[in-house]
Amino acid sequence: TDLRPLDILSEVVPAHGLARGMRVFQVQGVRGFQLATSRPRSLGFPASRLFIHCDRFPEEFSIIVTLRVLSVPAKRNEYVFTLMAEESPSVLVGLRYGPDKLHFLFWSQERAGGWQTRVTFPNVSLSDNQWHTLVLAVSGQSFSLTVDCSIPKDVVVETPFPASLSVKRASFYLGNRRRRKGVFTGLLRQLVLLPGADATPRICTTMNLKVATLSVPAVLQDVPTKPASNEVLKYPYETDTKVTLGSRPPCTKQEKMQFWFNASRRGLYLCNGSSWISMLEVKQKLDYVEEYQNLVTNSETMGVEVFTIPKVGLFAATANRYTPPGSAIYKWTEGKFVPYQNFPTYQAQSWKYFTIGKKIFLAVANFEQNDRGQEFSVIYKWSRRKEKFITYQRITTHSARDWEAFVIEGEAFLAVVNHREGNNHNIDSVIYRWNPRTGLFETNQTIPTSGAYDWEFFTIGPYSFLAVANTFNGTSTRIYSHIYIWLSGSFQLFQSILTFGAADWEVFHIGDRVFLAVANSHSYDSGMPVPSNFYAINSSIYELNITAQMFVKFQDLLTYSALDWEFFSVGDDSFLVVANSFDGFTFSVNSIIYRWQGYEGFVAAHHLPTVGCRDWEAFHTAEGSYLLYSSAKEPLSKVLKLKTT
C-alpha cells in the first residue's frame, strides 16, 4: 500500500495562487481557507488526480482535518468534504458536522442500488471558534476519531467500509456536497487522506496539538516567503483583527480576537470572549502590598469565591459560619465590594461558581443540618430577569467542605467533598454528572475519602485528573491523599501522596512545568508521641515528572496550620500565597507570599498579617490586581491591593 499522504486541500489550490472562491485568513496566528458559498462546484477536482494508478478508494485509511468551526445553528450540518460520482447525487465518501456531532458518510455498493451508511461520533464540540485537528481512522467495521490528540472515540458499526469502492468519474468537493445547502462556513487549514494507516502516531508528536500538521498547502505555511525589495507577498492573506484605541472597551463574544491598545499603560490586549488578556506591555513588578478594603461579613468566613458574570460584573461570595444571617455575595461597585444578596446557609464552608452553556450556577457546601434536621448543600442558578441567584437543586451531603466543577469530553460534572457522617470520617465523596435531558445533576461515581477537605481538578494534555485532600481518618492526620485520572468513563487511582491534615490542593503551571501544592494543616496521630507543635509543619510542592509519569516532591515550605494556597502572576513573575491560620498559640499569624525564583524555587517575599486566615483569592480589575483573604476567626475579610512598579 502506498502510504504517501494525499493532500486533498492542495489539489484545489493552483500553483500560481488561489482558486476562485477561496480567501486566506489568519486567526490566532494560524492561516486557513475561507470558502465561498456561491459556486460550490468550483471547489472540486476529479478523483483521478489523486488515484492515479488505481480507481478504488482505499479499504483502510485515515482522514486528517485541521479546521476552525464557527457556531453551527441547531439542526444544521456543514460538509468538510465529499466524494461524489458525476451522474449521482449520492455521497460516496463524506465528512460533515453538526452541533456537538461529527458524521462520516460512505456508500455501500454490494447490493443492488446500494445504500448510505452514516457513522456518528457524539459529544464532539467543535463550534468554539478555536482551531482543532481531527484524525479519523477507518478499518472495516471500526471507526476511530481523535480530536486534538485526546483519547480516541471508537465506534463499531454493522456495515463495514467497502473493500472495493469505485471512484471512476467521481470528484472531490471541498466544503460542500455540490450544492449551496450545508456549505462549510469556517476556516479549513488541512485536509489529507492517508491510505493504509492510522495517522494518529504521525500527527500527535507536536506540542500544539490543535494545529498538528501532516501536509499543508504552501499558501497556508506559517512563515511566508520574504518579498524582495518592493515586491508584494506571493500569497496575500487577510485577518479579521481590529485594534481599538482609547478607554477600556467591552470584551464579549462579538469582540473575541480583537485587540485593544491601552496608551496609558503602553499595553496591547487581546479579547478572549470575556476578558482582555495582555499580549504586549511594559511588564509590571510587584513592589509591596497595601490594605485596600475592610470587608465586613455576616460572620466568620470559611471560604470565598471571586467570579465574573458577563455583562453584569465582578462578585465575591463569602461562605459564612452562622445562620442567621447566612452567607452573602458582594458586587464590585466603584472600586469596592458592596453587599448584593444574602443566602440561608448552615455553617457554609465554600462556594463554587460554574457555567453550563449559557446557564450560570453557584453551589454552596453546607457543613451542618438546617432547622428541620435536613442536611443538604444547594445549587443556585442565576436569573437574568431578577438579576440574582435563585434555588435550583438541593443535594444531600455529609458535612460538605468543597465543590469542584469541571467538564470532560463535553460533559459537565460537579464533585462534592463529604467530610464526615456523625463521627465517621471514612465515607464516600460523590461526583455528579449533569443530565441535559432532566437539567439536573445525578450521581455518577463515589470515591472513598477520609475527612476530606478539598477537590482539585486539572488537565495535562488530553488527560483529566482529580486530586482529593484527605485530612483525618478518625485516628490520624498522617494519611494518604490521592490523585485520580479519568479513564474509560470514570476516575481511577493514579497516585497517592502522604499528607498531614491536607486542607487544599493547588495546581499551577510555570512555563511548561506543572506543579501541585498541598496545604498541610496539622500533624496528629493517636498512636504516636505528641509533637512539640502540631501546627508548625511543612507544606509541600510537587512537580510532574513526565518520564516517571508521577508527581515528585520539589520543595518543602514551613507553614502554620496551612489551609489554602493561591497561585497568581504579576507581569512575568509567579507567586504563591499561603493561608497560615494558627501557630499553636495564636490565630494572628503572618501569611506569606512566595516568589518564584527559578532554581531556588519559591522564596518568601512578603509577610502579611492575618487573623485565622482561611482562604485566598486573587483577582484583577481595570484598576489593578488584588488579593482577598477570608478570616475564620472574625467577621472581617480584607481586600489587599498589589502595588507595582
Image (cartoon, rainbow, N blue to C red):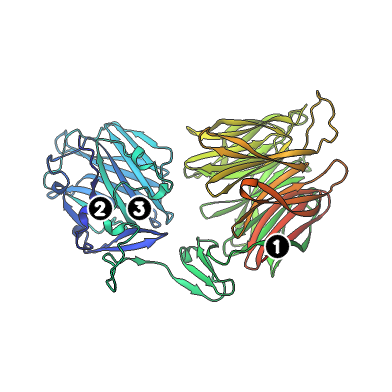
Q: Nearer the viewer, residue 522 or 42?
A: 522
CA neighbours of label 2 inside 10 A, class few (<14), some (14 to 19), many (20+): many
Q: Which residue is mark 3?
A: 67
Q: For the C terminus, which image quadrant?
A: bottom right
In this rendering, position of residue 95 left or right of residue 528 = left
Front tag of 1 and 2: 1
Observer-side mark, 1 or 3, equals 1
Q: Which mark is residue 287?
A: 1
State if disc 3 and disc 2 touch (CB < 8 Å): no
Residue at 50% over, 45% down: 436
N-terminal of the pair, mark 1 or mark 3, is: 3
Amino acid at pointer 1: Asp
Q: Is residue 396 above or below residue 528?
A: below
Q: Position of residue 247 (x, y in %)?
A: 57, 75
Q: Residue at x 23, y 53 (%)?
A: 10
Vertical position of residue 194 compared to residue 239: above or below: above
Q: Residue placed farthest to the bottom in the image?
A: 246
Q: Quadrant of the N terminus?
A: top left
